[in-house]
Image (tube, rainbow, N blue to C red):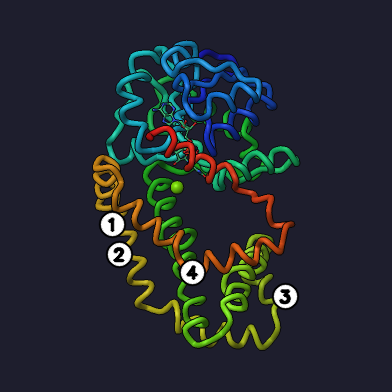
Amino acid sequence: MTTNTKPRITIVGYGSQGRAHALNLRDSGFDVTIGLRPGGPTELKAKADGFTVKTPADAVKGAELVAVLTPDMVQPQLYRDVIEANIPQGATLLFAHGFNVHYGQITPRADLDVVLVAPKGPGALVRREYEIGRGVPAIYAVHQDCSGKAEQTALTYCAGIGGARQNAIRTTFKEETETDLFGEQAVLCGGATKLVQAGWETLVEAGYQPEVAYYECLHELKLIVDLFYEGGITRMHEFISETAQYGALTRGTYIVDEHTKAQMKKVLAEIQDGTFAKQWIAEYAAGNANYKALKQGDLDHPIETTGKKLRAAMPWLQQPATKPAATAAKQREEATA
Ligand code: NAD
Ligand code: MG
């Protein structure tokens, strides 16, 4: 990298994170080029947003910093086939998740600086928070520092996407990868989904109306999570009734008990020893049959039918904060079709 304080950036991938980073960096004064496969599903969107779009190889050639923001499972081949031969000597290679470097799927060329900037939120939120002058917290790490300036580069990028407005915390590729996977599996996505479904099923199987069960077990979760977000569990206790507090304090551990915690440790162990990564890489390589079937199970769960009906009567909910993730998934299917 040059001493220029604002490196010329190429972003490969224009999905959830790619679009948010690109728009924020441009608004922060960076020169941003997008690298995409010609005719790929997000090319038109990037052009409509006013970006110069080149093939990944051409886009990478002119860059001082290359942000790899394609799905994790396509990154190793993309690195081997396109990035390695085209990224300039001494450039910075940046990831938003440490998976491929940490699990040895990508071994970056020795002359590159290799950094991680991981916003702790979906792309749509990264963009929206930036637009209203705030930011999503980000964590950053340095894997390889040839120039002696890799940390500074990561922090410059962090600031450019708005992440440094919230305290950017230094981490390692290992810590980011393992905690990110644990969070999404045990608590945020896996744990929360199964908790909601099991709660709803329990009420419906006991003869209560599915609609009432939906409000109780899914819809109202947002109100609680908003209180967590603003002021932690302390704030929740300030806002809920004494009866709710007493019930929560005496019954919460019926649900999340020592067994649940032992299972969480198992989830973590499989992340740490590489079992999960190996399984996911094999699943992807074999065509995702099991992944697709399990996902269909979530989509076909009866709570989705109840929810769809109820949400139709709540039109103010129809501007979802996280639309790009769903759009990107659809685009992925189109791209691989
Ligand atoms: P995404 O699926 O939303 O976007 C993928 C983009 O890559 C699309 O523009 C697609 O057309 C393009 N693409 C796919 N294959 C390609 C190829 N071979 N060559 C060039 N472009 C290709 O991806 P995402 O969810 O934004 O994830 C990107 C990275 O960000 C991943 O490393 C992920 O772990 C990380 N991350 C994601 C989130 C999130 O909220 N989605 C949060 C933090 C970190
Ligand atoms: Mg993740």
Task: Judge by depth and name the residue closer to the eye, 78 or 113.
Answer: 78
x 56%, y 77%: residue: 210
Q: Check mark 1 vs ligand 2: CB closer than 8 Å? yes or no.
A: no
Work out whether mark 3 precedes mark 4 in sequence or the reverse, and give the earlier one: 3
81 displayed left or right of 47? left
Q: Amino acid at mark 3?
A: Phe
Q: CA distance from mark 3 to mark 4?
A: 31 Å
Work out whether mark 4 precedes mark 2 in sequence or the reverse, and give the earlier one: 2
Work out whether mark 2 precedes mark 3 in sequence or the reverse, and give the earlier one: 3
Residue 251 at what x, y percent from top left? 51, 86
Numbered tag placed on residue 239 in the rendering: 3
Q: CA distance from mark 2 to mark 3?
A: 34 Å
Q: Amino acid at mark 1?
A: Glu
Q: Secondary structure at mark 3?
A: helix
Residue 16 at what x, y percent from top left? 54, 39
Residue 192 at what x, y percent from top left? 49, 65
Q: Check mark 2 vs ligand 2: CB closer than 8 Å? yes or no.
A: no
Q: Are marks 2 and 1 in contact (CB under 8 Å)?
A: yes
Q: Is residue 144 above or below residue 281?
A: above
x 60%, y 35%: residue: 20
Q: How packed is label 2: few (under 14 Cα within 10 Å), some, or many (20 or more)?
A: few
Indicate which label's residue lies in the foreground, 1 or 4: 4
Q: Which residue, given by chain and number where applicable, does mark 1 sit on?
A: 270
Q: Which residue, given by chain and number where applicable, does mark 2 sit on?
A: 266
Q: How packed is label 4: few (under 14 Cα within 10 Å), some, or many (20 or more)?
A: some
Work out whether mark 3 precedes mark 1 in sequence or the reverse, and give the earlier one: 3
Q: Is residue 319 above or below residue 237?
A: above
Numbered tag placed on residue 2 in the rendering: none
Q: Which residue, given by chain and number where applicable, does mark 4 sit on?
A: 302
Q: Amino acid at mark 2?
A: Lys
Report which quarter residue 216 is drawn in: bottom right
